[in-house]
Amino acid sequence: MGKNFEDIIKKAENYRVKYNNTFRDKIIEDMHQQISTILADVIQYKETNDLLGKIEKYVDLFLTSRIGGILVLTIMLSTVLWITLSGAGYISSLLGSFFEYIESGLRKFFDFLKIPELLTSFLIDGVYKSVAIVVAVMLPPMTIFFPLFTFLEDLGLLPRIALNMDKIFKSVGAHGNQSLTMMVGFGCNAAGVVSTRIIKSPKERLIAILTNNFMPCNGRWPLLIMISTVFLAPLVASNSNPLVGSIIASTALVLSVFIGLVFTLIISLGLSKFLKSLGSFYILEIPPFRKPNLLRIIYTSIIDRTVFVLARAVYMAIPAGIFVWIINHLNLSKTITNILDPFGKLFGLDGTIILSYIIALPANEVVIPALLMLYTNSKNFVEIEQLQSIYQILTVYGNWDWKTGICVMLFSILHNPCTTTILTIYKETQSLKWTIIATILPLVTAFSTLFIVYNFLLKHL
Amino acid sequence: MIQKKYMYNDIRLIFIILLFILVIILFKISAKLIKNRKNRLIKEKKEDILKFLYNQAEKNQETNFEKIQLFSKLKPEKLMKIINILLKERKIKYDKENIKLTNDGVKEAQEIIEKHRKIEKYLFESTSVKIEEIHSIAEKEEHSNKLNIELANTYQCIDPHGDVIKGQGVHSFSILKLTQNLDNTNKIFKIIHIEDEPREIYSKIVQLDIAPFDYIKIKEINTNSIKIITNRGQLIEIDFILAGNIFIVEEENKNEEIEILFNEIEENFDLISTLDKLKINQKAKILGLSFYIRGEEKRRLLELGFVRNSLVEPLYNNMLGDDPRVYKIKNTAIALRKEQAQKIYVQKLN
């Protein structure tokens, strides 16, 4: 028996040497041939000359033509973003009042239990409120954006867009699928990082993970919209002409996304030069168009994306809430802002803006509430709906002008990822080194860009 | 008050002692690190010298002290030290003024070379490290003691340059460089080894897509280049500089399968092309994939049905041009980039 076994091993080794590297190919070739002979007997293919097949072919040709490709991409993106942003505010305020209702209930309950004032304040003002605000601002855009995006995914439209965009990304050493992960990044950078799993080759995947942050996520849109409407639009159009104003504002928004795109490409190029010893490959399956499956859409978008991101955000919001509470109760905010002020001034920002970005580490959504809180010296996050009153607070208390607006906008696009995203990057790359690089790299990019733009350009205007 | 002062003094004393201990520990650790590094460097040099001696012996060349020095670029005193260590370990011996490996030395050199090939094989099959970088990484990693478990378990016997991992080096066979066979036109040879040093030349050979185990037929000999046909139907012109790094062997008994293949190739020569050169809706049959499509990429392509004799057809380009392009294979649409399509050989069908 033992001898027999050794004989077999020896025989196998001889075969390996004889057929060398084609051994595996030969087996797979044989398998394919056998399968196709079997299939030829049992399966009949419908002729693809019927109407549906023809339509599908023409749709494909249209989607991959120059006009069609660009048209579909722009319409799709702008529609999805518009629906998300216009719908989110409404649900957000509903959720906000719901959380307020719970808060008052909680307060009564704590009173009833005779829990000391300080602890109540710590638990409710510190922990509960920050979690509530993160959920209230983060959840609505995601519940709208992700189902819409998953719908397009299920339809089979996205691989064709990735195909169209590949040449641009190839020129900087990245993968065409990165365009899809960037689109998910519009919804949430953490989800964008997770979605890089569709990129199979490790180098391109790493590039996509590290640059996803340059796409403004849902949390940054409100700030960008606010600045472009109340700071940039009035520069050109008088307040009496709303149409021109909104055109300017939307141009500024598109421009800011464009800046993010340019930085994505530049950083991708640098990274691919840095990682040049790794090779790459590109194989993309183009699925046929199909009828979207509603259940699957809801499952993927709500469970896989929204809940998953939200859970991590809540997890990161608790320590941030405690941090804010401590700062406010020890009246530290003025001291910290004063320390940070000269540093911020170098980049056209100020200490308050930098502190509010530190507070907003767990979620970019709370930048505006934190700013308002710090400027108005209140004890809690301040939420204001009207853009005009935000404008007044920022200009009166913070001495903002349009230059500050541009600087904050740039910083918002380029700054470090939120802690939720950082945590996700660590989970995805399993490497502390790349997580740190993913955090530091955008921060360095943001500060150096701002330094140049502010000191050499904006200051002299 | 006084007590407190004493207490401060005590704390200071403890602090100083602690600092002292810390400094000693740091010193010891750094000394150990330096020693480790020194030992590692000596080990690397030792192994490099053994490998060098082994290669020289395979080429039937005598090796003396100066030759080793030229190879290792060490100072004579340092080299002498290492050679003395090797002599003590009985891995080398003096034969008059020449230095030779003992049986122990041969064994160790073989082990190192085997390790080198295993690492190269692993990098080639399981990572996406570029093919030109594989040799230099293997050159570094072969000295480390801990070999990756995955690596140790790979039961593959041929490295990416065509060498049998547990076998002898290329120089021990009765094989020829491509430049040595100039009179043998229209004969079929098998490439069995491609030298991976120097890197620039190797990378050029890779770009021409000439790989170990290809069969080639010499077609034409010019003053400084050779024209060959490969078993994938490509007519390639090779410089003599490149040809000198390609080793071929003539098969002892006639291999009819290969002869039929070459006859077929020459009959259909005009129809053979690569996937990227096909026009839209031009149906074709796949002849094979390049040797340099490897690892994960190869697995994916084979899974999708890019195997010999499958039918393939370009469907449409993308918005910005023909890179990447969508191909129809086994009733699915797959997009491939140009560089990949270039490495897939096809024969056009009418």
Image: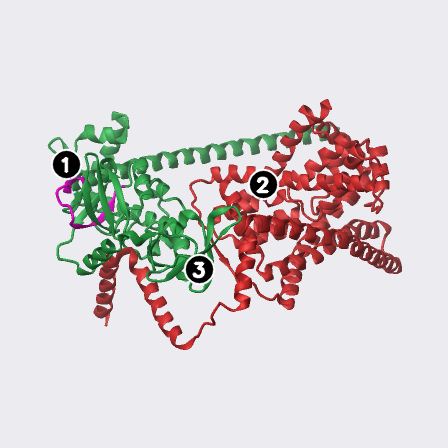
Chain coloured green:
B
Residue in view at x 60 percent, y 48 percent: A70
Chain A on-screen colour? red
Reading the image, the residue beneath label 1 is B61
**Element type at mark 3:** strand
Q: Is residue A17 above or below residue A262?
A: below
Which chain does the numbered disc 3 sit on?
Answer: B
Quarter occupied by the N terminus of chain B: top right
Q: Nearer the viewer, mark 3 or mark 2?
A: 3
Horizontal side of B244 relative to A188 (left or right) equals left
Reading the image, the residue beneath label 3 is B328
Q: CA distance from mark 1 to mark 3?
A: 56 Å
Residue in view at x 68 percent, y 56 percent: A311
Q: Nearer the viewer, mark 1 or mark 2?
A: 2
Mark 1–mark 2 CB contact (< 8 Å) = no
Quadrant hosting residue A100: bottom right
Q: Position of residue A159 (x, y in %)?
A: 54, 55
Mark 3–mark 2 CB contact (< 8 Å) = no
Q: Which residues are magenta?
A: B179-195
Which chain does the numbered disc 1 sit on?
Answer: B
Reading the image, the residue beneath label 2 is A264
